[in-house]
Amino acid sequence: MEREAAAPDPRLRFAPEALGLREYRRAFFRGDTIKVARSLIGAWFARFYDGEWYGARIVETEAYLGITDAAAHSYGGRRTARVEPMYRDGGHLYVFFVYGMHYCANVVTRPEGIAQAVLLRAAEGPPGTPPRLLSGPARLCAALGITAASSGEDLLVSGDLRLFRRRARRPRIGVTPRIGVDYAGEARDWPLRFFDEDSPAVSGSVRLRATGPAAPSSA
DNA sequence: CACATGATCGCCT
DNA sequence: GGCGATCATGTGG
């Protein structure tokens, strides 16, 4: 029994066309995972529900590099029913259930068969929204009403879940190791977490963590 | 502010 | 059987 998607928080209602937002092309998501993770800072993650758009501006992401990345669910080529969406073409959604109570959403990257993804860790709602509402991967899913029932959906054509390109100028981007992957050996310290330096909605108080050695190529 | 802990269960070993 | 890509709450400084 899969928990159904829930209604999004009404405070997240917005109008993509009023903001002049445009969608991505498939090729963008097939590209380098680290670049996609950086580029998604400032993008809007949106859901069309009951005739209205709900969404938030992404302010924190993490890159997961697949077969060579001990922190990734697809590490070593692991391929189970849960992880299967990570093997799809770039631009699909991968949602997983953690700690018996939370959901986390990822944007799948690279071409079909290469299981890499970008975890959406935090976002800012429309003006006036409390900064903590979407500050953390599970809160982000809860606020938008996303569950594992949406895992595997296509973010480009299928319909109710979409990504829109950033329109404002490039944000100042901070980099640190990823959160909550201390078990992952040397991958633990890879600098693969990206966040908007000027956003109050970035999760935790972990901006200052030391960065490890350079990230490996995600290609 | 900085930890520490409990909740709660699917997934993998 | 153990643990996790988390969060809210509680304690102490």
Image (tube, coloured by chain):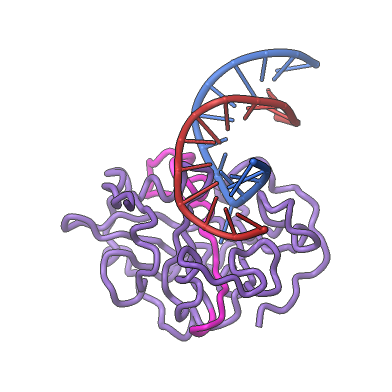
Chain colours: A purple, B red, C blue
Q: Nearer the viewer, residue A139 or A209?
A: A139
Give residue A86's position: percent from left, percent from top: 50, 71
**Residue A205 is a magenta residue:** no
Question: In percent of the image, x 42 and y 83: which residue is there?
Answer: A26
Give residue A182's position: percent from left, percent from top: 74, 51
Q: Is residue A181 left or right of residue A15?
A: right
Q: Is residue C8 left or right of residue A24?
A: right
- Compared with A5, A71 (above or below) is below
**Where does the C terminus of chain A fall, quadrant-wise?**
bottom right
Question: In percent of the image, x 17 and y 55: which residue is there?
Answer: A50
Question: In percent of the image, x 65 and y 69: which residue is there?
Answer: A75
Q: Is residue A128 left or right of residue A201?
A: left
Residue A102 visible in this rendered orientation of the protein: yes
Question: In percent of the image, x 60 and y 57: which residue is there?
Answer: A195
Q: Nearer the viewer, residue A61 or C8?
A: C8
Dividing the picture into quarters, in which one does residue A91 lie? Answer: bottom left
Give residue A170's position: percent from left, percent from top: 55, 67
Q: Nearer the viewer, residue A153 or A62?
A: A153
Residue A139 visible in this rendered orientation of the protein: no
The region drawn magenta spans A110-139
- Compared with B4, A141 (above or below) is below
How many marks are shown on the rendered structure? 0
Q: Residue furthest right?
A: A213
